Image (cartoon, grey):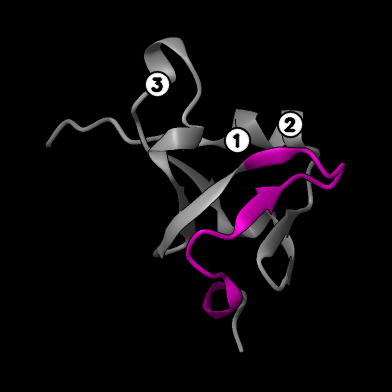
């Protein structure tokens, strides 16, 4: 079973240090799409953010544990631009 197939909708994403990073909206390709409610503030507010499946260390029930600490993991987040190419 692949790591992506173990990740459930609405699972909590936590850093290696146990810090809340976000909540899973769904898995899209090789990335976890986080819910908008965890998008932060300011110009980050209201956007979906993504975390690479490469950062996932383990899936424990309804928790997705990352291999990086929470404060580091958010620097790897990608933001959905909403622009079409």
Q: Is residue 63 above or below residue 48?
A: below
Contact (Cβ within 8 Å) of mark 3 with mark 1: no
Q: Is residue 37 left or right of residue 52?
A: left
Question: Which residue shows up at 17% across the image and 31% down it?
Answer: 83
The quarter in which the C terminus is drawn is top left
Mark 2–mark 3 Cα distance, whole angstroms, equals 19 Å
Q: Is residue 22 above or below residue 57?
A: above
Seen as rendered, the residue at the extreme right is 17
Find residue 60 and report its horizontal and vertical position in percent. 75, 71
For the residues carrying marks 2 and 3, which lies nearer the camera in this image?
3
The quarter in which the N terminus is drawn is bottom right
Seen as rendered, the residue at the extreme top is 42
Question: Which residue shows up at 54% across the image and 49% down it?
Answer: 23
Question: Which residue shows up at 79% across the image and 52% down it?
Answer: 67
In this figure, which residue is indicated by the disc labeled 3? Answer: 45
In this figure, which residue is indicated by the disc labeled 1? Answer: 76
Q: Which residues are magenta?
A: 4-21
Find residue 82 and report its horizontal and vertical position in percent. 21, 33
Find residue 45 and report its horizontal and vertical position in percent. 40, 21
Q: Is residue 63 above or below residue 16?
A: below
For the residues carrying marks 3 and 1, which lies nearer the camera in this image?
3
Mark 3–mark 1 Cα distance, whole angstroms, equals 17 Å
Find residue 76 and report its horizontal and vertical position in percent. 60, 35
Classify mark 3: residues with Cα within 10 Å, few (<14), some (14-19) or many (20+).
few
In this figure, which residue is indicated by the disc labeled 2? Answer: 72
Contact (Cβ within 8 Å) of mark 1 with mark 2: yes
- Magenta span contains residue 73: no
Mark 1–mark 2 Cα distance, whole angstroms, equals 7 Å
Where disc 3 sits, the SS reads loop
Classify mark 2: residues with Cα within 10 Å, few (<14), some (14-19) or many (20+).
few
């Amino acid at each position: 079973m692949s790591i992506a197939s173990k990740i459930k909708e609405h699972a909590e994403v936590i850093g290696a240090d146990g810090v809340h990073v976000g909540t899973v909206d769904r898995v899209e390709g090789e990335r976890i799409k986080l819910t908008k409610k965890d998008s932060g503030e300011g110009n980050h507010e209201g956007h979906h953010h993504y975390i690479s499946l490469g950062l996932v260390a383990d899936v424990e029930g309804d928790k997705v544990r990352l291999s990086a600490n929470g404060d580091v993991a958010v620097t790897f987040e990608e933001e959905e631009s909403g622009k079409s190419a």
